[in-house]
Image (cartoon, helix red, strand yellow):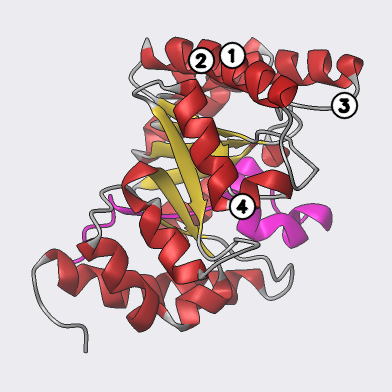
């Protein structure tokens, strides 16, 4: 039997429909629950209309009514580092809004990008970013959440830089949203495996779903214990692409949960 508490669909997967105004966050929750049969919500804040109390109260009720657990809150426009100090200050305001929302919604993990656009890190960047992450992590720890970066863009696509962040932050609940294969150097599969025990959450794109039988079992063997989240970047035919990706991941992962070989 499928355990759909352990799978999710990132709401960014519907950014094409969002751009067309053909879906909103509540339509996503309906889709997660009733189209895909999930028990989880994987929310990208690009779908959040605002952070006012009336709206967030309604969002909390919508989650509760559907019995959905927020396994990840993915926060853009909140990245820690920016070369412009004014942008850093504005982003920090967004980060704290997202953390407060994460507490309200019972989010298990929160992704806030490091923000490095360069390929190498300066001492100033590491010191500033690690200090902010420690503050964010300690606040998230108060409600039992993990918080961290993603190997998303810039210097965080280099595994050495990601390890530098882990060493500098040094908080038990600091984690990585592992974007499978999104590395700029080395063997991408091996890099994924190297960070799998640090992964608080995972996003699996269309291409990795197509190779699910090859790429996913080693992650199970490597000790990954988080949610298996698919993310579609196609911005077209999104309902069907998501269904295909989710079917591929559950087809491979579910038997492994019971020590069976996928067929």
Q: Is residue 54 visible?
A: no
Above-or-below relation of 109 to 57: below
Image coordinates for residue 131, horizontal then vertical, percent:
59, 13
Which residue is identified by label 4?
A: 158
Disc nearest the viewer among 2 and 4: 4
Which residue is identified by label 2?
A: 134
Say few, some or many: other residues with alpha carbon within 10 Å of mark 1 (under 14 / 14 to 19 / 20 or more): some
Q: Earlier in the sequence, mark 2 or mark 4?
A: 2
Secondary-structure class at tag 2: helix
Secondary-structure class at tag 4: loop
For this rendering, which residue is in front, 27 or 163?
163
Which residue is identified by label 1?
A: 131
Above-or-below relation of 199 to 243: above
Q: Earlier in the sequence, mark 1 or mark 3?
A: 3
Distance between mark 3 and mark 2 Cα atoms: 20 Å
Which residue is identified by label 3?
A: 83
Image coordinates for residue 22, horizontal then vertical, percent:
75, 57
What is the total number of numbered labels drawn onto the structure image?
4
Say few, some or many: other residues with alpha carbon within 10 Å of mark 2 (under 14 / 14 to 19 / 20 or more): many
For this rendering, which residue is in front, 263 or 129?
129
Q: Is residue 145 left or right of residue 116?
A: left
Q: Quadrant of residue 49?
A: top right
Range drawn in magenta:
1-27
Disc nearest the viewer among 4 and 3: 4
For this rendering, which residue is in front, 159 or 48?
159
Q: Quadrant of the C terminus?
A: bottom left
Above-or-below relation of 231 to 217: above
Labels 1 and 2 touching (C-beta < 8 A): yes
Q: Quadrant of the N terminus?
A: bottom left
Residue at the image point whose x is 55% and y is 18% from the top: 99
């Amino acid at each position: 039997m499928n355990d759909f508490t352990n799978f999710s669909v990132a709401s960014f997967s519907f950014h094409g429909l969002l751009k067309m105004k053909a879906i909103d966050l509540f339509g996503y929750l309906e889709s997660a629950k009733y189209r895909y049969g999930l028990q989880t919500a994987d929310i990208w804040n690009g779908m959040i209309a605002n952070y006012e109390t009336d709206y967030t109260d309604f969002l909390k009720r919508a989650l509760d009514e559907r019995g959905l657990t927020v396994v990840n809150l993915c926060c853009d426009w909140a990245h820690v580092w920016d070369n412009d100090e004014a942008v850093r200050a504005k982003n920090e305001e967004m980060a704290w809004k997202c953390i407060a929302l994460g507490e309200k919604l019972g989010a298990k993990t929160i992704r806030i990008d490091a923000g490095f656009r360069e390929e190498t890190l300066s001492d100033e960047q590491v010191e500033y970013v690690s200090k902010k992450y420690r503050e964010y992590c300690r606040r998230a720890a108060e409600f039992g959440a993990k918080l961290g970066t993603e190997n998303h863009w810039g210097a965080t696509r280099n595994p050495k830089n990601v390890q530098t962040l882990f060493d500098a932050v040094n908080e038990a609940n600091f984690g990585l949203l592992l974007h499978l294969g999104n590395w700029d150097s080395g063997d991408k599969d091996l890099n994924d495996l190297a960070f799998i025990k640090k992964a608080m959450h995972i996003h699996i794109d269309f291409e990795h779903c197509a190779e699910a039988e090859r790429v996913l079992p080693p992650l199970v063997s490597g000790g990954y214990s988080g949610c298996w989240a698919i993310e579609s970047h196609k911005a077209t035919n999104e309902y069907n692409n998501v269904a295909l990706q989710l079917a591929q991941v559950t087809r491979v992962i579910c038997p492994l949960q019971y020590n069976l070989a996928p067929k």
